[in-house]
Image (cartoon, helix red, strand yellow):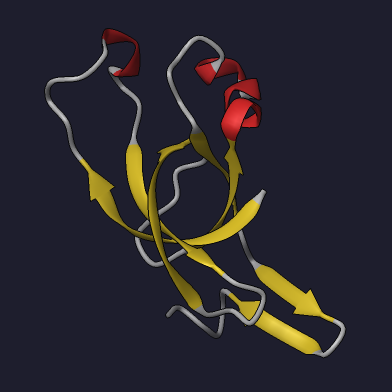
């Protein structure tokens, strides 16, 4: 699993039939220092995340372990909205204080 920030939405009117009704979001991965990486990815949203939120992303075959996506061509799924991230050095992220 990886930390990421939701950067936007992806809308596609022509797509594989099994993806009808799947909310797709553009995410940007976050490194261990809390900095945004240069990588972007599209992920299916399982939890109703919004733009600007930090999320937990499951990738590869693990993304299809969620019941609604087991038969869909999904390679990344947002499985949680993050409230806080703490390191041994202190608090890295708090949703209530930091909505970067």
Q: Which residue is drawn at 34% across and 46% down?
A: 25
Q: How many labels does the image show?
A: 0
List the single residue furthest toward the left.
13
Q: Position of residue 71 (x, y in %)?
A: 50, 9
Q: Residue at x 58, y 32 (%)?
A: 60
Q: In this view, does 85 lie to the left or right of 64?
A: right
Q: Is residue 46 left or right of residue 34?
A: left
List the single residue furthest toward the right.
88
| Residue 22 falls in image quadrant | top left
The answer to whether any part of residue 4 appears in the image is yes
The answer to whether any part of residue 46 appears in the image is no
Q: Position of residue 76 (x, y in %)?
A: 50, 37
Q: Position of residue 38 (x, y in %)?
A: 40, 69
Q: Residue at x 51, y 83 (%)?
A: 98
Q: Which residue is drawn at 45% across and 78% down?
A: 99
Q: Position of residue 18 (x, y in %)?
A: 34, 11
Front-most of residues 77 and 51:
77
13 in relation to 27, above or below: above
Front-most of residues 29 and 20:
29
Pick the quarter of the image with the C terminus.
bottom left
98 in relation to 95, above or below: below
List the single residue furthest toward the front.
38
Q: In this view, does 65 lie to the left or right of 6?
A: right
4 in relation to 38, above or below: above
49 in relation to 97, above or below: above
């Amino acid at each position: 699993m990886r930390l990421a920030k939701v950067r936007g939405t992806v809308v596609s009117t022509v797509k594989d039939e099994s993806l009808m009704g799947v909310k797709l979001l553009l995410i940007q991965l976050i490194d261990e220092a809390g900095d945004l990486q240069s990588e972007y990815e599209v992920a299916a949203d399982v939890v109703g995340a919004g733009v600007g939120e930090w999320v937990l992303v499951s990738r590869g075959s693990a993304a299809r372990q969620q019941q609604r996506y087991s038969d869909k061509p999904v390679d990344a799924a947002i499985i949680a909205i993050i409230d806080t991230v703490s390191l041994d050095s202190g608090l890295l992220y708090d949703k209530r204080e930091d909505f970067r």
